[in-house]
């Protein structure tokens, strides 16, 4: 039995709780959870400069609705790394419904990206592509009934993102 998703949920909850305790303002998102980033980061700004890219291709024509059994990889390209995911203390993670994905960060300058320097980087590409769907299965109780929120397995567990320094 794969227990990584349960650990992911616990790590993500701790990260959300810790970030909400800091001086940063909580920002509600479309997915319904608080990201806890400062207002400037929520608007895509670092030191008053925009961090989002205007030349990023959008994927609005391939809209897939996520449900309990289907996860959809978000579009991270153009986002500031500090906005894109929560730092769990060891890596970046993003909840997707009851499941979640880890971000494997590859920087163009070879730097190790953590919560301390994430605001200095923006995401320029990702794999798998935004809109990629994956199956989510749930643990069963002793009666064979499915738990509503305990993920057993998921088709995508990590997204590789390439980042570059902002303003260098």
Image (tube, rainbow, N blue to C red):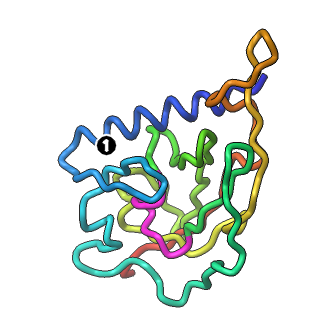
Give the side of residue 100 with respect to residue 28, left or right: right
**Marker count (numbered):** 1
Question: Is the residue marked by circle 1 packed among few (<14), some (14-19), or many (20+) residues within 10 Å?
Answer: many
Vertical side of 29 occupied by 99: above or below: above
Vertical placement of residue 25 versus 1, above or below = below
Place of residue 155 in the rendered image (x, y in percent of width and height, measured from the top left): 78, 47
Name the residue nearer the viewer: 63 or 82: 63
Quarter assignment of residue 1: top right
The image position of residue 47, as x and y in percent, is 23, 74
Q: Secondary structure at mark 1?
A: helix
Figure check: 128 above or below 157: below
Residue at (72% x, 75% y) in the render:
62
| Residue for point 31% across, 71% down | 43
Image quarter hosting the C terminus: bottom left
Q: x%, y% of residue 147?
A: 68, 24
**Which residue does the numbered mark 1 point to in the structure image?**
19
Is residue 122 inside the magenta stretch? no
> What's drawn in magenta, residue-wise?
77-85
Residue under the image location 41 percent in, 57 percent down = 29
Question: In the image, is 64 to the left or to the right of 38?
Answer: right
Q: Quadrant of residue 130?
A: bottom right
Residue drawn at 69 percent across, 81 percent down: 61
Closer to us: 54 or 134: 134
Q: Nearer the viewer, residue 95 or 77?
A: 95
- Above-or-below relation of 27 to 11: below
Name of the residue lying farthest toward the bottom: 55
Q: Is residue 69 left or right of residue 112?
A: right
């Amino acid at each position: 039995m794969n227990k990584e998703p349960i650990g992911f949920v616990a790590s993500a909850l701790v990260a959300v709780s810790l970030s909400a305790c800091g001086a940063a303002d909580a920002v509600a998102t479309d997915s319904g959870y608080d990201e806890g980033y400062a207002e400037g980061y929520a608007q895509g700004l670092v030191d008053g400069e925009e961090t989002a890219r205007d030349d990023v291709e959008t994927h609005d024509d391939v809209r897939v609705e996520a449900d309990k059994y289907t996860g959809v990889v978000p579009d991270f390209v153009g986002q500031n790394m500090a906005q894109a995911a929560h730092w769990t203390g060891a890596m970046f993670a993003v909840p997707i419904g009851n499941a979640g994905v880890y971000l494997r960060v590859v920087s163009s300058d070879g730097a190790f990206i953590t919560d301390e320097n994430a605001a200095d980087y923006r995401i320029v590409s990702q794999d798998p592509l935004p809109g990629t769907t994956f199956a989510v299965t749930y643990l069963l109780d002793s009666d064979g009934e499915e738990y509503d929120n305990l993920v057993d397995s998921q088709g995508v567990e990590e997204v590789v993102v390439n980042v570059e320094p902002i303003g260098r």
